[in-house]
Image (tube, helix red, strand yellow):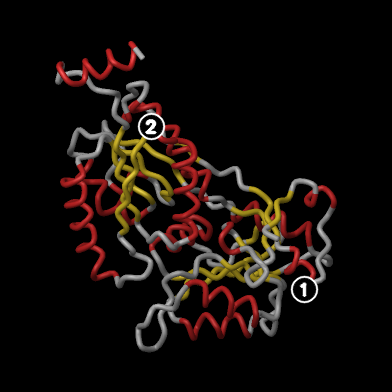
Amino acid sequence: MRCWMLCLTLVLFFPGFSYAKSSKVLVIESYHAEYPWSQSYREGLESTLGPDYQLEYFEMDTKRLPQKQHLRKAEAAWESFLKTKPDLVVLADDNATRYLGPILALQSIPVVYLGLNNNPRDYSVYGAKNITGVLERPLIKRAIASAGSIFTPRPRQALLLLDNSKTSLAIFQDLAQGNPSPTFSQIRVDIRLVGEWNSWKQLVLESKKNNYDLLFVGLYHTLLDQNNRHIPAGEVLRWTSEHTPIPPLGLWEFSVGKDKTIGGLVLYGKEQGVEAARLIQQILNQGGSPGQIRPVTAQKGHFLFSKTQLTKWHVKLPDKIEKKSNWVE
């Protein structure tokens, strides 16, 4: 009781006295809260940081909005930053970093990015004294190699479908290296960047006729129909799962499920959030200088499968893969 009274007295009569406030972190997101990747890295951020950090989010929604509106959303994100006055800013994924990174690099506030698919130099944040972050390196080559040991007979040709977003273009450039049909682990992979929904459907429907053994479902979130209407990602994935004549494999955790893909070696957004949270703690708790902290790469990846899809496609996992796999159902 005496201790409680003493604390109350200090608060009432000594205005300078206060309990330690939680750090305020503004997360400027390239996409939207319903996007599974965003939900996953949010989980990583929130579970790692805990109640000592106050997280606020601004959604740029660039998966669904046309590109001509992206700059306007970036300006709104900047206004949110000025209004929020955070202790640290998180730039989540490529577009947030591309639009906000250069101007934040001129400020003193610490910044942590996550989910970058390109070199930080490409976003004008490399070498900034107040910026560091987490790189995203999709595990596509390893995913293809592991798929070769799952299916019998061993697949020889695969089709990898990506939308035409900037993220997909970065992945394409990294994988293709000037060759849109590279070979990984003795599997030839035709990589296709697709912007139109009808084109996507045609490629899926004709995949078996074109001698593909596997379909890798990459990113599919910016497809448009003939009226420039955005096709919801869930609709794309469900249609693809239902109509593909060849087994569909996923590359990100959100694409695996009973009405989605079989699964495979996939990337988890949560790991991006966890790694970013550790950088945030290092900067705000330990006084680390962002510019002196090297960017990190979260690319462990995990085997994730749908039992429903495995049954549908009559796939029996090798014991060594099954023992270390996770399951969505």
Locate residue 73 relative to residue 169 in the image: left or right: left
Q: Give the residue number, with chain letter if any, for mark 1.
A: 312
For the point 33% across and 64% down, the residue is: 62
Q: Please name the amino acid that badge 2 sits on.
A: Asp
**SS under mark 1:** helix
**x, y (%) of residue 115?**
43, 49
Within 10 Å of disc 2 (Cα), the crowding (few <14, some 14-19, many 20+) is few
For the point 65% across and 68% down, the residue is: 261
- Residue 14: quarter of image: top left
Outermost residue to the front: 1
Q: Please name the amino acid that badge 1 sits on.
A: Lys
**SS under mark 2:** helix
Within 10 Å of disc 1 (Cα), the crowding (few <14, some 14-19, many 20+) is few
**x, y (%) of residue 145?**
70, 55
Foreground residue among 146 and 312: 312
**x, y (%) of residue 231?**
44, 78
**x, y (%) of residue 11?**
21, 20
N-terminal of the pair, mark 2 or mark 1, is 2
Q: CA distance from mark 2 to mark 1?
A: 46 Å
- Residue 306: quarter of image: bottom right
Cβ–Cβ under 8 Å for marks 2 and 1: no
Q: Give the residue number, with chain letter if any, for mark 2.
A: 52
In this rendering, which labeled residue sits more in front, label 2 or label 1? 2
Location of the C terminus (image quadrant): bottom right
